[in-house]
């Protein structure tokens, strides 16, 4: 009697790929074939045990349970695995000279107030050191862009974003929208940004501890800068002095985004910092999913989670 050949792992992979090869939409077909291919290869390479497989299911379940309108554990996973930065780079390749992008992160909120030049986004922060951030928005020829919109958000000096601070009762704080003047200039009053740990009380925190990583993000301020006819840029500026610049938990640091925060101690006056940073926008390419679309989708995600 002929001995039958047992089915192998590779037989299963081939069968799954064949099944997904029927996907009518070509883009979805490519994504599903790539996903199945790499996922199977990963499981086979590390020889995943059943216990590990079950642990992975528990981790994903817990991540889902933690998500709300204020918390997005899956984005944190994407950020801490470095995936968000790879997606960002693929989608926002910039010519040299254009301000580089970095992660959007989970803390943007819609509805920040529009403030005049020099407006203070930190009116309720009593412990931070006053800081003036200013600069220009320019095109790649160095020409000023008038009326560019600067959407800025930042953690409070406590290290918490408004959405994480129960004392604020849901109020917006440390957020604002500014317009550049005829010379392309903007001015934002705030407090010195501080470094802060990403939320580590969930499965992402457990992953960081188990892999010997820290949860800290170097001090930074978030920006989305947009203007008519230009591609918007989602980015941060970082404080050059921060000890975590070389080990950002979400891999978001780029050299060109590191900025000098200078301390001024006028005799008899209040100590304060100044930082200058110019944003260079590249011309808009053909219409693709805009940063704003992404923001609105994220807001919708949060709203659904809150239901
Ligand atoms: Fe941040």
Image (spheres, rainbow, N blue to C red):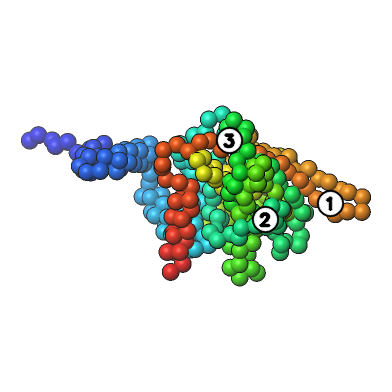
Count every numbered label the image shows and give the total.
Answer: 3
Figure quadrant of the N terminus: top left
Q: Residues within 10 Å of mark 2 (few under 14, many from 20)?
A: some
Residue identified by numbered label 1: 271
Could you tell me how far apart the alpha carbons at marks 2 and 3 are, in whole angstroms?
22 Å
Name the spot of residue 159 as percent of width and height, x first: 67, 56
Report if residue 36 is visible in the image.
Answer: no
The structure residue drawn at horizontal position 74% and vertical position 49%, both measured from the top left corner, is 132
Residue identified by numbered label 3: 139
Nearer-the-camera pick, 30 or 229 = 229
Residue identified by numbered label 2: 116
Secondary-structure class at tag 1: loop
Q: Which is more foreground, mark 2 or mark 1?
A: 2
Secondary-structure class at tag 3: strand
Left/right of residue 78 with respect to residue 143 in the rendered view = left
**Mark sitting earlier along the chain (3/1):** 3
Left/right of residue 15 with respect to residue 239 in the rendered view = left
Tell me if label 2 and label 3 are in contact, CB under 8 Å.
no
**Mark sitting earlier along the chain (2/1):** 2
Q: Which is more foreground, mark 3 or mark 1?
A: 3
């Amino acid at each position: 009697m002929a001995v039958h050949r047992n089915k192998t792992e590779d037989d299963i992979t081939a069968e799954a790929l064949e099944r997904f090869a029927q996907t009518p939409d070509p883009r979805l077909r490519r994504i599903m074939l790539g996903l199945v291919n790499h996922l199977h290869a990963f499981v086979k390479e590390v020889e995943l045990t059943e216990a590990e497989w079950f642990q992975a299911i528990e981790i994903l379940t817990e991540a889902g349970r933690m998500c709300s309108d204020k918390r997005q554990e899956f984005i944190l996973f994407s950020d801490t695995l470095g995936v968000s930065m790879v997606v960002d780079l693929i989608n926002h390749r910039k010519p040299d000279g254009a301000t580089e992008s970095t992660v959007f992160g989970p803390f943007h909120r819609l509805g920040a107030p529009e403030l005049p030049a020099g407006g203070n986004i930190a009116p309720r922060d009593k412990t931070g050191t006053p800081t003036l951030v200013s600069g220009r928005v320019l095109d790649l020829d160095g020409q000023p862009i008038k009326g560019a919109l600067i959407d800025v958000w930042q953690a409070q000096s406590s290290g918490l974003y408004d959405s994480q601070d129960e004392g604020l009762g849901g109020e917006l704080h440390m957020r604002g929208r500014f317009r550049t003047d005829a010379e392309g200039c903007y001015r934002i009053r705030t407090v010195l940004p501080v470094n802060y740990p990403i939320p580590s009380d969930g499965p992402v925190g457990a992953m960081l501890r188990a892999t010997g990583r820290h949860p800290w993000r170097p001090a930074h301020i978030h920006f989305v800068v947009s203007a008519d006819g230009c591609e918007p840029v989602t980015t941060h500026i970082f404080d050059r002095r921060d000890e975590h610049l070389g080990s950002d938990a979400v891999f978001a640091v780029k050299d060109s985004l590191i900025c000098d925060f200078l301390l001024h101690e006028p005799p008899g006056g209040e100590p304060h910092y100044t930082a200058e940073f110019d944003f260079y926008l590249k011309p808009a390419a053909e219409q693709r999913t805009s940063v704003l679309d992404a923001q609105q989708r994220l807001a919708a995600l949060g709203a659904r989670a809150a239901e």
